[in-house]
Image: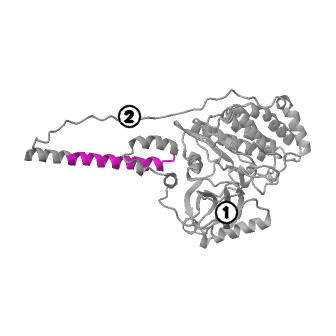
Amino acid sequence: MAKRSKSSTPNSSKAGSSVTEADEPMAKRIKRSTSSFSKAGPSEMDEPTARSSTSSTSNSSKAGPSVSKMDKPTARGRAKASNRGRAELSVLLCERSFHRHCSRMLLSSLDSDTSALHSFMAPAAPEPAAAMGPLDQLLSVCSVSSLVTFEEALRLSNVTKCIKLGEGSYGEVFLVAHEDEESAIKIVPIEGTLLYNGDTQLTAKSILPEVVITRALSNLRDGTYNQCSTFVELKRMHCIRGEFHPVLLQAWEEYRCKQESENDCPDMFPAEQMFAAFEFVASGKDLNPRQLADIKQSTSVLLQAACGLAVAECELNFEHRDLHLSNVLVRPTTETDVQFILNGKSIKVPTHGVRVTIIDFTLSRMEKGNTVLYTDMSKGNFFDGQGLYQYDMYRFMRNWNKHNWEMYQPRTNTLWLYYLLTQLNTKTFKMDRDTDTRVELLLSWLPKLFEEPSATSFVKKFF
């Protein structure tokens, strides 16, 4: 989720990140490498035309034959009419059962978004009053039947560890450990009337795209023609009602005491408050370039992120649109390579001891068939921020797409890779001949990334 900064807007970087934009020696080298294109600034594109897909159905009826009141049906005629009536009723019941079955199947499918489901189901629904509301849709997409308590969802009474990892404008992230598993839990209040962090809460309808996108990206690890495990693995979704659990409140307070929190304390929520909770595989810590061991690890981080974005582009027409340092997690690994499949081609990226996971798809854009899932960023304050380079990325995106956030423009992915590369080069490594050569190579990619039309084109040129 987009993060806030004291110096700017409610949508800024995650609290706790202490990475500066650039150290002086390397900044001079970046400036020297990018001087040829940075003066021109981002190119502005023609006003795009929004996509639209509509479906319509028409129903016609035929007038039946008129029957005179004086015509008295025979016993045989009454029997035929009765049988015909039972047959028509049986057909109607079968049709209704079929439509309900299709609705359940479609809503539980993670390959479709709710707007497409509405356009499919609306014409076929025999009873409009029975159509699913946003909350029912969220329950179906989350594969749950009803709202549950925090205890029922997360088993918080018998945790071995619970700490707050971070926060964003729309919610909190906790690490919850049991004896049998450890998970990262992202908790987002929804549907409430109270202002949260100075803004209105998300609705069940507005959080649905993130749920669908998160599941689709997680499932890329099972792909065959396009495959990657770079995006955070979703274990399960929970829809919760109730006051914030005491165990979570304690972890929240411990976090506030160690480092200042910018979020409202969640003890504000009443018993009727609802939450959407994403339960992920724990995947490491926020990327801090200063903690990387050497230039090889910096290169691996960039290439792992690039290959993951390329796979998602090819499979889902995906744009992340918010890939700042807090949305790239890293962890140590003993694996020598990370495997990718891009349009049927196998790619190996050396890890050099570090594994990358991309998270947070609040602002992301994804496409499946004729359905487009996206967040209209023109309605936020993303473009007013100052003091962090990531705010320039939001403005670049706006200049390119002229506020048409539905349009697919994978160039935004290479824009964020460019941003990551500038941040990775804030690390000052102990220089030797090999390291100096690698740094120069890394720096030579800056103008290429800024000008590439997609992560896919960059990866294909590199591998």
Distance (Cα) linking label 2 and label 1: 52 Å
Q: Please tell me whether residue 191 is drawn above or below residue 64 in the rendered image.
A: below
Q: Is residue 271 left or right of residue 144?
A: right
The residue drawn where x is 41% and y is 50% is 129
Residue 171 percent coordinates (x, y): 67, 57
Q: Please tell me whether residue 408 is drawn above or below residue 128 in the rendered image.
A: above
What kind of residue is marked 2?
Ser
The residue drawn where x is 16% and y is 39% is 67
- The crowding category of the residue bearing disc 1, from other C-alpha atoms within 10 Å (few below 14, some 14 to 19, many at least 20), is many
Residue 96 percent coordinates (x, y): 34, 48
Residue lying farthest top?
A: 46
The residue drawn where x is 88% and y is 42% is 26
Q: Nearer the viewer, residue 339 or 181?
A: 181
What kind of residue is marked 1?
Leu
Residue 66 makes an appearance in the image: yes
Q: Nearer the viewer, residue 144 or 48?
A: 48
Residue 376 percent coordinates (x, y): 64, 42
Residue assigned mark 1: 175
Q: What stretch of residues is rendered in magenta?
A: 85-111
Q: Secondary structure at mark 1?
A: strand
Which of the image's four quarters has the C terminus?
top right
105 within the magenta span: yes
Q: Nearer the viewer, residue 190 or 435?
A: 190
Residue assigned mark 2: 58
Residue 111 makes an appearance in the image: no
Q: Is residue 123 left or right of residue 401?
A: left
Q: Nearer the viewer, residue 250 or 461?
A: 250
